Image: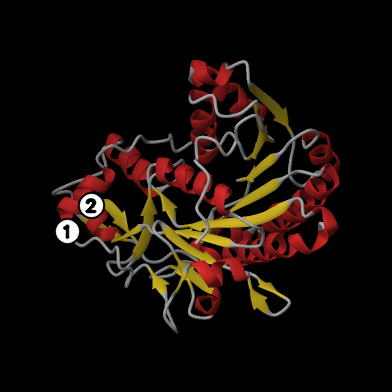
Amino acid sequence: MQTPRDPDEIFRDKTVLITGGTGSFGKAMATRLLSKNLCSKVIIFSRDEWKQWQMQKSHPLFNHPKIRYFLGDVRDKDRLARAFHEVQYVIHAAALKQVPAAEYNPSEFVKTNVQGAMNIIDAAVDARVEKVIALSTDKAVNPVNLYGATKLCSDKLFVAGNSYVGKSGTPAFSVVRYGNVLGSRGSILPYWQELLKEGATALPITDVRMTRFWLTLEQAVEFVCSSAGRLLGGEIFIPKAASVRIVDLANVFAPGVPHTLVGIRPGEKIHEVLLSQDDSRQAFEYDTGYVVTPFTQGKAHHYYTSTAKHVPEGFLLSSDTNPLFLSSLAEIRKLIENIQFEPTT
């Protein structure tokens, strides 16, 4: 397995642009880059001027001399071309993500998640960006909802984007795929917290069998940085992350508070999958994660096949059979004890 470059050196003297930069991940990534002085410039690219203003006011770090705010939408190819000028690294975190909303507004999700991905690829190739890392989701694996289907399509586009770069070899496009982020805006813990503040006497649970993969924002940022140091182009990187039953998470978050079963929402699964059995034929395991390698002339990247551990035949990384499944309430309590919640709005 390729030895990654030091995560604190990967972005040294680089200009890094983060699409969807006012979201939970974007702010956490910008915080890491700026607090450690890891790059020459951070560009926050997003479409909402109010959220950019809120971000600037939320912490002195977000008025750092090295940060810039760039209004734009990934649907607008011309605006991306302007934003990518003299950018070396792009972290693509912009997406429409709400599963039920996707079921009722499919065309909007296609425009942002699919057409937006195509625009990112074209703009990055034209601007000679060095590396593009696109963030994905477990819902892109064997998707049953429109959101997952758009992210699967996006992942395929970014992997295939490496075919367009010609002899220069740049940009190198890769994907980082993970599950739910604890405490992020719109996620379940801030939602439950808001309900309890409003006087709720029970927490809504979709299904007692439901499990999900979980990691913290800090873990997500760290994994993206380490993946940036490993990528050759075309890989899908997957972290080793804990999974937990939703009902156990509720019991730890609000002990003694009863639950109300509300049923599975449109497009939801009982269990999520980060690595399918089909993908396992091209998948390799390393200390902190897995990598699904692309086919190059019918073969996976020889670098990984010769230096990493191939996962077993038929390997499946599912949230209910995950080797890192947490069933102990003490383990789950430790997982969430230091989570800082993003607001739900």
The residue shown at (41%, 71%) is 317
Q: Is residue 14 left or right of residue 212?
A: right
Q: Which residue is mark 2?
A: 332
Residue appearing at x 62%, y 66% in the figure: 152
Q: Which residue lies under the disc numbered 1? A: 328
Evaluate if marks 2 and 1 touch, with contact meaning CB atoms under 8 Å apart: yes
For residue 344, what is the image quadrant? top left
Q: Position of residue 176 (x, y in %)?
A: 55, 55
Q: Nearer the viewer, residue 205 or 324?
A: 324
Three-letter amino acid code of the residue under disc 2? Ile
> Quick one: label 2, few (<14), some, or many (20+) residues within 10 Å?
many
Observer-nearest residue: 150 or 80?
A: 80
- Separation of marks 2 and 1 at Cα, in angstroms: 6 Å
**Secondary structure found at label 1:** loop
Query: Residue type at mark 1?
Result: Ser
In the image, what residue occupies the spot 52% across and 33% down?
27
Q: Nearer the viewer, residue 315 or 112?
A: 315
Residue 141: in sight, yes or no? no
Q: From the top left corner, tell me how far across and down residue 24 is, in percent.
A: 50, 38
